[in-house]
């Protein structure tokens, strides 16, 4: 299980994703953009991501566009897949805790 993933891009700079308690913290930094930090409450995300070309997108539980978009297999397939599995599990656990339905956490 891994709770941190860093993806680098010449175009978009560096994006760091970190699972912190019941949040997903996304830190974006780049030479032109500066540094930004966004926190997402895990219980608001749908645990089943959607593949869109070279990106894996997590949508909110309420119909809207993707709230989180990861580049598939970056920095490498093993660490990417480990992070995504941890994230999906943690989203299910947090939503189950939020609703009181422990079966959703499995």
Image (cartoon, helix red, strand yellow):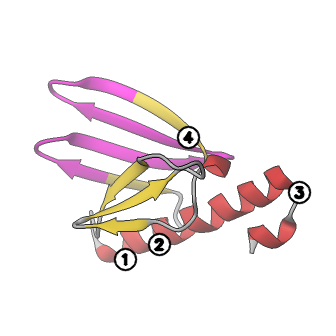
Judged by depth in the image, the label closer to the viewer, 2 or 4, is 4
Quadrant housing the N terminus: bottom right
Magenta range: 7-36
Q: Give the residue at mark 1.
A: 78
| Marked residue nearer the N-terminal end (4 or 1) | 4
Quick one: SS at disc 4? strand
Q: Residue at x 36, y 53 (%)?
A: 69
Residue 35 percent across, percent down from the top left: 32, 25
Write down the residue under mark 4. 40
Q: In which quadrant is the C terminus drawn?
A: bottom right
Picture quadrant where residue 34 is located: top left
* Front position among marks 3 and 2: 3
Secondary structure at numbered mark 2: helix
Percent position of residue 66, x then y: 41, 50
Distance from Cα at disc 1 to Cα at disc 2 = 6 Å
Q: Residue at x 28, y 53 (%)?
A: 7
- Mark 1 nearby-residue class (10 Å; few <14, some 14–19, many ≥20): few
4 and 1 marks in contact (CB < 8 Å): no
Task: Work out how far the residue at label 4 is from the one at label 1, CA to CA, in angstroms.
Answer: 24 Å
């Amino acid at each position: 299980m891994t709770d941190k993933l860093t993806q680098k891009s010449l175009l978009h700079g560096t994006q760091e994703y970190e699972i912190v308690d019941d949040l997903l913290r996304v830190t974006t930094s780049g030479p032109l953009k500066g540094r930004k930090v966004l926190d997402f409450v895990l219980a608001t995300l749908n645990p089943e991501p959607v593949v869109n070309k070279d990106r894996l997108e997590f949508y909110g539980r309420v119909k809207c566009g993707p709230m989180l978009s990861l580049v598939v297999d970056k920095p490498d397939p093993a660490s990417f897949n480990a992070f995504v599995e941890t994230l999906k599990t943690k989203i299910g656990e947090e939503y189950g805790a939020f609703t009181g339905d422990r079966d959703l956490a499995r």
